[in-house]
Each structure stands twice: as structure tokens, then as C-alpha cells.
Image (cartoon, helix red, strand yellow):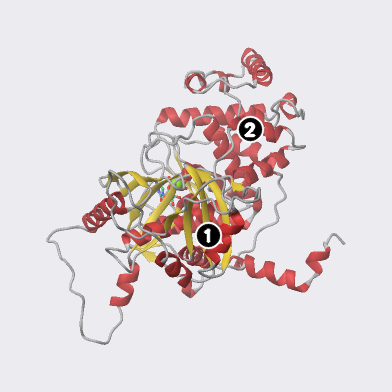
Amino acid sequence: SRASPLSTCPIFVLITQAKESKTFQAIQEERREQAERSVLISCPSKINENTFLDDLSKHGTINKHFFYNSYGAYAVVEFSSRESIASLKESTNIPAVEHEAAVPFKSRLLSLKWPGSQSSNHPMPKFKVQSPLSINEISQLLSEKDSIDEQLQCLTEALELTEENVRLRFLVCSLLQDIAGAYFPECIIRPFGSTVNSFGKLGCDVDMILDLDGIYATSQKKGSGLSLEYQVKRGASERAVTQSILSVIGKCVDQFGPGCVGVQNILQARCPLVRFAHQPSGFQCDLTANNRVAMKSSELLFLYGQLDPRVRHLVFSVRCWARAHSITSSIPGAWITNFSLTVMVVFFLQQRNPPILPTLDRLKELAGPSDKCVIEGNDCTIVSDLSKITLQQNTDTLEKLLQEFFEFYGNFPFNKTSINIRKGKEQTKPETTALYIQNPFETTLNISKNVNATQLERFVALCRESAWLLQQKEILNQCPDSPWGFAALLLPSVTSGAGVKSRRKRKLEPASSRIKNLLDSLKIKGGETVAKKGNA
Ligand code: CTP
Ligand code: MG
């Protein structure tokens, strides 16, 4: 039998089952509660870990802690009870600042100036990495692998959010909630998007929602005959209310938020938001409000990511490939976004024979009564219990899926057809935008409306080029010293001129020139599909 000794142990089996059956909501609640029992402490980098922990333990049991470097050294400390936080806050001093004035707001961001006992040469704490590997480092790492399948698995492990990074993200939301709570004590600040959808990579932004549903929940209870008097504004829309709430919170973050810098109110956007950098964590944060549909689409992507490990491997690979070729960008514009790319991968996996992923309509059919969810007239119901979903047997390798993903979108009829994961079928495009991907829950919206024809053409050209490259023996020859397999697909493209110039010159010349030669030979042989897009 292949079973390891551990898996035959009944306790172990029990634990894995319990872990697997946790719903998205349950996971979020657990993380959120954990964050509320945590503090963030700026500390000297030569800190004596033992004395540091001894001192903090005076306030209660510490469940977990870790150190990291951002703009200086920091520690995240999780206590087992919230009372410890109150006790710790009691014992803190208000800092004396010279020539400057501090706004007295007690937060859970603390700072420790003294490294602790210096007597013996104490060991330095281990600092957990919070930043992503560079493309060159990734390329190096992948080239040491034995197969493309191993490369794609390794890529996910190298890029995905670590346990510590996720904790830090929830902690930053929780710290923000303390600030927003000054106005709205019942509010909850929840992360959404790639922080929670299982496709986040180290270094990605923290998308947050200011959730005020707690206020509505209490006012719904019948009984006293009293109702709350709200400030009512004549003619104001829901959007205007969201804007005014965010503008106040934005101001609060700017004035009172320790470590929050570069606060920008972007209230005129389709989805109004407050953008800022949280310096102690190094995170770029986007705070929105009244954005419950986006939370639901994060849950949907999370669910798809859990159903089959190949989903995450393929999404991470495609996102990494797209970033390497400047198909996606950190600046907003006419480019394809990571969200769109993820939905494209899901759609592709629904098209396999047999399908690897079920349609969104199927996920709705499987939902139980408690899963029912309607947001602003949109039915956002999806099953929350993963064990209700049965998958068909499909044994495609990652290499095959990657190859066929590129072929699929390299030849997709984008001019007439839209991508629809609800039906899992191609549909006729309702309008003439270059790329039409139906929003999973707000079905009259296109999530890739921003994409222009040039950007779509670049994507298609790169898909074709990569599909072609994956068919070349030279690419598939393992070579630990130069990029091969997936790593070779990350090299500067020879077909998209503009992209190459703008990118930094890489040290990977030998393989790059090899691929260039391969491509040149293709052009000579009349491979016009690749060559004709030369200036796209
Ligand atoms: N979203 C949406 N419609 C859009 C864009 C975004 O519903 N047109 C929602 C999605 O749920 C998405 C979330 O907003 O996951 C956050 O958007 P964004 O930050 O652009 O995408 P992420 O998935 O977080 O990916 P990234 O790592 O690039 O931040
Ligand atoms: Mg995001």
C-alpha cells in the first residue's frame, strides 16, 4: 500500500477531513478572529527573541509569533485571548516626540526600542520573507526541475502567499477596522480579491471591504417599537452614501492611521475606493465599501481553486507568464487583469473533455438553503460545501493543459464570442468591446471592458508563440544551467517588439538567442500566424 504510516493513524485522518470541509466563510472568520488577538510590533533587528517573548507573556499566553523585515524589523504576535491586548495596551507609553506633535490614537501597532538583554550573544530571530522572487530567480529555480509539471507545481509554491503573509494581511485589515470603528463601531473590514481567493502571490495588493452589514442586522430585530433615526439626504443615491462614508474613513486613515501613508480618495471610480500604503507591512491597500458581489466572486474563485490542484498551478503559471510579458501590469489601464486571466483559465478548464471544473450554474444547483444569496437583485448563490461537488475523471497533465491553454486562446474567436463561466459555454458577444468576459454574478457587466484591441492582440500573439515554443524539442530538453520548459516561456518575446524594449535586459542570453533562432526559422518556413503579429 502507498499509504504513509501517518495516514493510517485515525487522528490524522480526522484532522485532514475537518480541515478540508471548512467553508470559505469559516476560514475567513477564523483568520479574522485570530487577527483581533494579534499585535504588530516594530522592533530592533538585533532583538533578543527570548526576552521579548518573556516580557510579552506577562500579558497572556502567546499562540504564535514571527518576525519579518519591511521598512525595519517587525514582529507579529498572536495572543490566545483578546484580554491580553487590553493588558498590553495598558502598559504602553505614549511616545515623546521632539519638534513634532503626535495624534493620540491608541492602536495595536506598537514599537519597542530596546533589543533586550545583550549579555550573551543571543541568536538572531529568523525573519520571514514577505516579498516575491524576481523573474530571474524563478527562472533559475524552475530550470533545476525535472519536468514541466514539476516546474508548474514549484512555481505555485514559490509565488503563493505564505501563512505568515496571510496573517499579516488580516492583521492590517483588523488594524484598519480599529480606525474605521471610531465612526462605525459595528463595522468589519474584510480582505477580498487575491488575498483570499487562493490565487494571491506575494507582493499583491490587499483589497478590503468596509462591511457595515452588522449595523443593519441589529436594526432588523423587532421588539422595542423604536427605530434608528438616520441622516437622510434628499436625492442621494447608494453610491453617494458609499462615497461619503469612504471619504470620512479616508480622512481618518490619513489623520490617525499609524503607518498609513499616501492616502488617496478615488471616489469617482466605478467602484469608489480609498488607496493607501501601509508602511509597516509594505502593503498597498485598496479600501472599498458596499462591494459584496466582489466578495462573492472571491469565494467563487477560492472554491474553483480548491476543487483540483491543477487549477491553482495553471492560474499561477498563466499569471506569471502574463506578468513576465507585460500582458498584465500593476498600473491600471487597457491591459488584461489577473482577475480576467483567472476567469479565462476557469473557462478553459470547463471546456476540457471531460471537464475539470463545473459550470457556475452547476454550483448554484448544488447549493443548500443556507447558501442562498441575492445581492442587489443578482442571484449570487453557490454551494459552500465542497464535498457536494463530484468531479469527472480527467487525467490531463499540467504540461498538456498549459500547451492547450495557449492553443485555445491563440485561436479563440474573440471578435464574435464572449467567455461565460456561468454556462461554461461560448456565447455571442452582446457588444463590440475587444474582450468580453461576463461578470460571474453581475451578468450584464463585462469584467474586461477596459481591454483594448492592441492588448488583446498582444495576448493572442503571445499565446500562439508560447504554444509553438512548447512544441519545440529544444525547449523541452532539460538543462539545469539555462531556462528550459516553462522558464523558457518567460524569456523576452521576439514577436512583441514594444514589450521587449521596455523590459530590463536579462542575463539569460544563450537560451534567449536560441529561441530567437527557432522563431526566425519558423518565420522563414512561413509560420505567418506568429510573424504577422510582429508589431502588435
Ligand atoms: N473585481 C470584479 N470586477 C472587476 C474587477 C475586480 O468583480 N472588473 C473583483 C474580483 O473579485 C477581484 C477583486 O475585485 O478578485 C479584486 O480586484 P483586483 O485587485 O483587480 O484583482 P485580484 O483578484 O485581487 O488580483 P491581483 O493579484 O492582481 O490584485
Ligand atoms: Mg487585488
Foreground pick, 79 / 206: 79
| Residue hosting label 2 | 137
Work out whether 529 lies above or below 183: above
Dot 1 or dot 2: first in sequence order is: 1
Alpha carbon of mark 1 to alpha carbon of mark 2: how far? Answer: 31 Å
Residue drawn 49% across the image and 62% down it: 38
Which residue extends farthest top?
524
Foreground pick, 478 / 527: 478
Residue 82 location in percent, x, y? 47, 70
Image quarter of the N terminus: bottom right
Instruction: Identify which amino acid the numbered label 2 is placed on.
Output: Glu
Instruction: Identify which amino acid the numbered label 1 is placed on.
Output: Val
The reply, left or right, for residue 190 in relation to residue 251 is: right
Which residue extends farthest front?
119
The reply, left or right, for residue 198 in relation to residue 143 is: left
Residue 349 location in percent, x, y? 60, 48
| Residue hosting label 1 | 77
Residue 8 location in percent, x, y? 81, 69
The answer to whether one can see residue 421 in this image is no
Looking at the rendered structure, the secondary structure element under dot 2 is: helix
Tell me whether the residue at label 1 lies in contact with that at label 2, contact meaning CB atoms closer than 8 angstroms. no
Within-10-Å neighbours for mark 1: few <14, some 14–19, many 20+? many
Is label 1 or label 2 in front? 1
Residue 330 location in percent, x, y? 44, 36
Residue drawn 56% across the image and 40% down it: 132
Which residue extends farthest right?
1
Within-10-Å neighbours for mark 2: few <14, some 14–19, many 20+? few
